[in-house]
Image: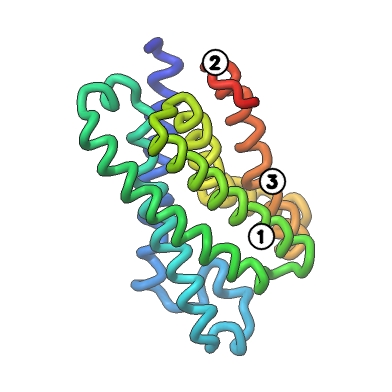
Amino acid sequence: MNTTNKVAWIVFALLAIAIGLYPLTYFFIDREFGLLASKSDVVLSNVLWNVGFYGHILFGGLALLIGWTQFHKNWRKKYLQRHRNIGKVYTAAALISGGCGVYVAFYATGGIISMLGFLCLGIFWVFTTVKAYTAIRKKDTLVHQAFMIYSYAACFAAVTLRIWLPLLSIAFGEFITAYRIVAWLCWVPNVVFAYFWIRRKGLILG
């Protein structure tokens, strides 16, 4: 691994760890914080929404926090059983977070544009995670690897959202427009990147 790749890997890991731990701040800071600041009192008092929201951020944070380790080829080969165990935890966390994400998408700030963006993200994350899991159950490692790349690309939207949102908010001078754009921008480019990465690795599907 050359110096550029090492730096990219370190940045990738640090971002995943930092944003993976970020949901814990909701337990130490007042609820009028982050994305919750844009929610109405009606939504904030909705028990099902709260279950969906905290299920989404906590299990999503866990998936993000542990998922990056699975892409280190040498580590994966050396600690295969650990790779499998972490993979099982990631799969469970991704399915819970993704399912909760589909539910809370219907309450997304910014209306139909934001709702559809996050709804598609949640469905894509769940779908690719299930495909990755069923592939490895069939011993199809190439398909498993390809769909896990797609799955983590969707998971990594938690990072890219927090990079793009403040930049877009500054550019447009207000939050709602920025949020509508970031509902798509946080994950679609990730999936495009994953597609070309998969092709580069020779894991072409179909």
Q: Count how many numbered circles sit on residues in the image.
A: 3
- Kindly report which numbered mark, 2 or 3, lies closer to the viewer in this rendering: 2
Amino acid type, mark 1: Leu
Specify which label sits upstream in the sequence, 2 or 1: 1
Query: Mark 3 highlights which residue?
Result: 185
Question: On screen, 78 above or below 56?
Answer: above
Q: Which mark is residue 119?
A: 1
Label 2 to label 3: alpha-carbon separation: 26 Å
> Is 66 left or right of 34, judged from the image as shown?
left
Q: Residue at x 67, y 42 (%)?
A: 188
Q: Quadrant of the N terminus?
A: top left
**In which quadrant of the rendered view does residue 30 lie?**
bottom left
Q: Residue at x 21, y 34 (%)?
A: 81
Q: In the displayed structure, would residue 78 be above or below residue 120?
A: above
Tell me, for residue 202, which label it has, or none: 2
Mark positioned earlier in the residue sequence (2 or 3): 3
| Residue 25, image quadrant | bottom left
| Structural distance between the alpha carbons of marks 1 and 3 | 13 Å
Q: Quadrant of the C terminus?
A: top right
For label 1, the SS is: helix
Q: Position of residue 185 (x, y in %)?
A: 69, 46
Residue at 50%, 29% in the rendered image: 143
Give the quarter of the image for residue 22. Answer: bottom left
Which numbered disc covers residue 151?
none
SS for callout 2: loop
Q: Residue at x 35, y 64 (%)?
A: 24
Callouts 1 and 3 close, C-beta under 8 Å: no
Q: Nearer the viewer, residue 165 or 63?
A: 63
Estimate how packed mark 2 is, as few (under 14), some (14 to 19) or many (20 or more) residues with alpha carbons within 10 Å.
Answer: few
